[in-house]
Amino acid sequence: MTEERHALRSTFDSTAALYDAARPEYPPRLFADLISLASLQPADRLLEIGCGTGKASRPLLEAGFTVVCVELGEALARQARRNLAGFPFEVQVAPFEEWEGARGAFDLVFAATGWHWLDPAVRYRKAHELLRPGGHLAFWSALHAFPAGFDPFFAEIQDVYDEIGQHWEGDWPPPTPELAPDDRKEVERTGLFEDVQVRRYVWDRLYTADEYVALLETFSGHIAMDAANRDHLHAEIRRRVGERDDPRVRRHWFAILHVARRASG
């Protein structure tokens, strides 16, 4: 992992309260599919990598499971403890790569938005060690989706990103959610997991200008942005959204859920 990437994954802790308010909830169907695909049973023990403020843990706790979380950020961990008080939930603050958990102790190891931040040389091997025989690994991310007919605001605002040197990398518009690549082959290449299942979800949410700016302030790239550039971007967002007949933007989200069974050996 590069030093820059290691620093970026630590930025979220500086916006713990904002992260809790601004980040979206995940679709209920995702959790129903996860429980089914991972063959989870009541009272199973789950490990979440990077629980943030607890948005992914809550539906699983409400379904009757016990969750242990390894979270990098102290402030995020405190917020998660407050949000999930009264549930069988425990947070330990540490980098997952360095955390010492009991081998074979969990029925499911999962990560919601945190998997891609982990050291690729460690994450699959360590998850395999922490799972019981026949246990499952699951991960997904909440990403900006660009389905057919997406809000034109996101194409129009690209000129401001270009002005501040934050050019869009790759094709524009990006692939639609059904064409976005998944990580099935990466999981299979490890030899540590089998029976890889993939499911896709798309949902949307309307944001006022202030709500959308608050959301942006929870993303690592925006947190690390030069203050003058960030202020210019936010001012343009507020101006342009405010000039719309309906002063809101519709942002689509998508998640690709991966669930794989621990291979023996």
Image (spheres, rainbow, N blue to C red):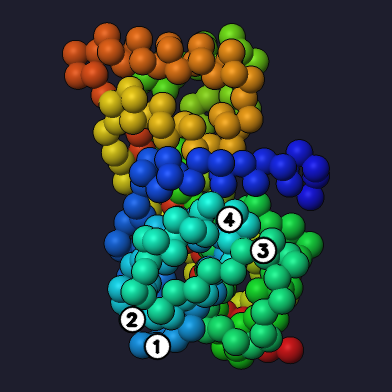
Residue that badge 1 annotates: 43
The answer for how far apart the CA atoms under marks 3 and 2 are is 26 Å
Label 3 element class: loop
Label 1 element class: loop
Give whichever of 98, 193 is nearer the camera: 98
Residue in the image at 44% along x and 52% along y: 255
Tell me which corner region of the image, top left, top right, bottom left or bottom right, holds residue 243. top left
Between label 3 and label 4, give the one nearer the viewer: 4
The answer for how far apart the CA atoms under marks 1 and 3 are is 25 Å
| Badge 3 or badge 4: first in the primary sequence | 4
Contact check, label 1 and label 3, Cβ < 8 Å: no
**Few, some or many residues within 10 Å of mark 3 (<14, 14–19, 20+):** some
Residue that badge 2 annotates: 64
Q: Position of residue 221 (x, y in %)?
A: 60, 32
| Badge 3 or badge 2: first in the primary sequence | 2
| Amino acid tagged 1 | Ala
| Amino acid tagged 2 | Gly
| Badge 1 or badge 4: first in the primary sequence | 1
Residue that badge 3 annotates: 94
| Badge 2 or badge 1: first in the primary sequence | 1
Contact check, label 1 and label 4, Cβ < 8 Å: no
Contact check, label 2 and label 1, Cβ < 8 Å: yes
Residue in the image at 34% along x and 74% along y: 86
Residue in the image at 41% along x and 26% along y: 213
Residue that badge 4 annotates: 74
